[in-house]
Image: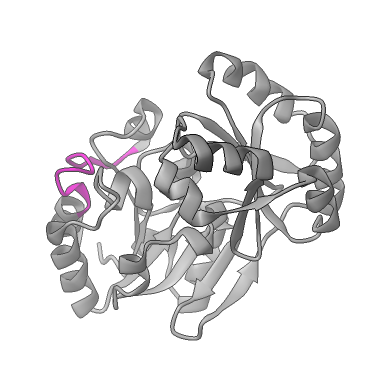
Amino acid sequence: MTIKLIALDLDGTTLNKESKLSEGNRRALQAAADKGVNIVVATGRPYCALPKEILEFDPVRYVLTSNGARITDLHEGKAFYENCIAPHAVEAAVEMLRPLDYVLETFVDGVAYIEGWYYRQVEETQQCFRNVEYILNTRHPVDDFYDFMLENKDRLENINVNFEDLSVKPAMKVKLETLPDVTITSSFDHNLEIGGATTSKAEALRQMGNLLGIDRSEMMAAGDSPNDMAMLKVAGVAVAVGNAKPELKEIADFIAPDHDDDGVAAAVEKYVL
């Protein structure tokens, strides 16, 4: 088997617990790129939240962001593929979510927006069930959040519903799944993500295959969370890092060491180098 493309989730997979690219993973990916393998980032993050070291890591040319809603060519400096939520689905989501009390985020044209009252609360208290620095550095506060979503309903890549109380998440997932023409996934324990009807890392990966002339059997994908499931299923080699959710490990061809122990490097060594 010849691997021509490696698709990599970032958080919990390629990045360690400090959200950094380890030297071991860096060396392995550079060696794969030197052999002509395409290194592709596939993340739930919006473009604006990509780490600087990933943007400046020369082997990475293509980034699939917002769970595959957007593909950007870093060399050209522009997005060439978008798969956003349908406007009628955004309207339905707003109608459902408006009466509820969850912290919402939305991604538009690669930029992440968050409810203004919550951003200011985090800024003032420096307290959050998520990483405070990440929220303040990557999110843009917006008041009248539901109106903002409706004003941009033809450009929403993603809507994130965040839960401090995880006990309410299962019932909310069932409720969100009744929305028309959407996909519901999750990239970390405290959120549910609303995407377009065909939005996924897998669909974006198919687009990459068409662009580069690479068959799915020639792809390796690595991940750790539910939003990586479809991507792992479509790739010829599916890699789950050691800290991945059990459902990913069940479908994986290889269970690598965890994200803090150069799991990606181990998979690259095994299948590429």
| Residue in view at x 52 percent, y 59 percent | 65
Q: In the figure, 34 relative to 19: above or below?
A: below
Q: Quadrant of the C terminus?
A: bottom left
Residue 273 in view in this figure: no
Q: Main secondary structure of the magenta part?
A: loop
User: Residue 49's x, y, as percent?
Assistant: 47, 58
| Residue in view at x 19 percent, y 79 percent | 34
- Residue 270 picture quarter: bottom left
User: Residue 231's x, y, as percent?
Assistant: 46, 49
Q: Quadrant of the N terminus?
A: bottom left
Residue 109 in view in this figure: yes
Check the image and name the residue furthest to the bottom. Answer: 76
Check the image and name the residue furthest to the front. Answer: 124
Viewer-proximal residue among 50 and 196: 50
Q: From the viewer's perspective, tell me whether residue 248 is left or right of residue 117.
A: left
Magenta run includes residue 260: yes
- Residue 161 picture quarter: top right
What's drawn in magenta, residue-wise? 252-264
Magenta run includes residue 211: no
Q: In the figure, 74 relative to 207: above or below?
A: below
| Residue in view at x 54 percent, y 13 percent | 167
Viewer-proximal residue among 122 and 154: 122
Q: How many numbered circles does the render carry? A: 0
Viewer-proximal residue among 5 and 116: 116
Viewer-proximal residue among 7 and 216: 7
User: Residue 170's x, y, as percent?
Assistant: 59, 18
| Residue in view at x 50 percent, y 55 percent | 138
> How is colour applied across the structure in the image?
one colour
User: Residue 248's x, y, as percent?
Assistant: 37, 34
Q: From the viewer's perspective, tell me whether residue 135 is left or right of residue 180.
A: left
